[in-house]
Amino acid sequence: MKTLIVYKSKTGFTKKYAEIVAGEVKGDLLELKKATASQMAGYDVIVFGSRFFAGTVDELKKAEELFAASGAKEFVVFATGATPNAAEDIVNDVWKNSFSSEKIEKIPHFYMQSGICYEKMPFGEKMMMKMASLMMKSQKEKDEMGQGFEEALKGSFDISSEEYVQPLIAYLKNR
Ligand SMILES: Cc1cc2nc3c(=O)[nH]c(=O)nc-3n(C[C@H](O)[C@H](O)[C@H](O)COP(=O)(O)O)c2cc1C
């Protein structure tokens, strides 16, 4: 089973999970920004790893287009975010915002809580977080965005763990 893990990672959480997956399934790793359809051709499974970004999966559309053009057989998605795994409703809303209703049924997708890292965050994205923090004054607004987001406005934190990637690894090994 030839597996390629294509990932986008700005602050390292998604990359770390992608590397664990690649090690476990003996897959190859490729950054999305360097990926072409021809590089993805010939793989049985393309695993796309990205982050939750303002309520959607960052660059999912681009990865789907590359997958479609590549002729690879199966597409699987995983995403990381500041939202805790336990906040299932928030996580499910992000999946719904990211996939069409038809694709959400067909494409296996996995979420792994990760955290936030201001030290490695690009300047423009730090500004986005600052603006979100200024715009969301009331506790009610913060509650609606969920606990992960409120934590993210306060500062860096890491709630990632190798255990959260195990369901994806089990899926890939048993398919
Ligand atoms: C501007 C911005 C928006 C974000 N939006 C969300 C979000 O909507 N939901 C969420 O759970 N995490 C959100 N995050 C947190 C990232 O998804 C999280 O830190 C992710 O693991 C980063 O992945 P990376 O380290 O691979 O770049 C956001 C982070 C930034 C900087």
Image (tube, rainbow, N blue to C red):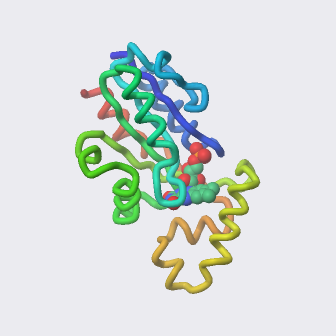
* x, y percent for residue 43: 38, 17
Report the residue at 34% width, 65% height from top: 89
Q: Is residue 20 above or below residue 36?
A: below
Report the residue at 35% width, 21% height from top: 72
Report the residue at 42% width, 46% height from top: 164
* x, y percent for residue 93: 37, 61
Q: Is residue 84 above or below residue 16?
A: below
Quadrant assignment for the N terminus: top left
- Is 42 on the left or on the right of 140, as rendered? left
**Nearer to us in this view, 134 or 142:** 134
* x, y percent for residue 153: 64, 69
Quarter of the rendering containing residue 21: top left
Quadrant assignment for the C terminus: top left
Q: How many marks?
A: 0
Q: Is residue 97 visible?
A: yes
**Nearer to us in this view, 70 or 156:** 70
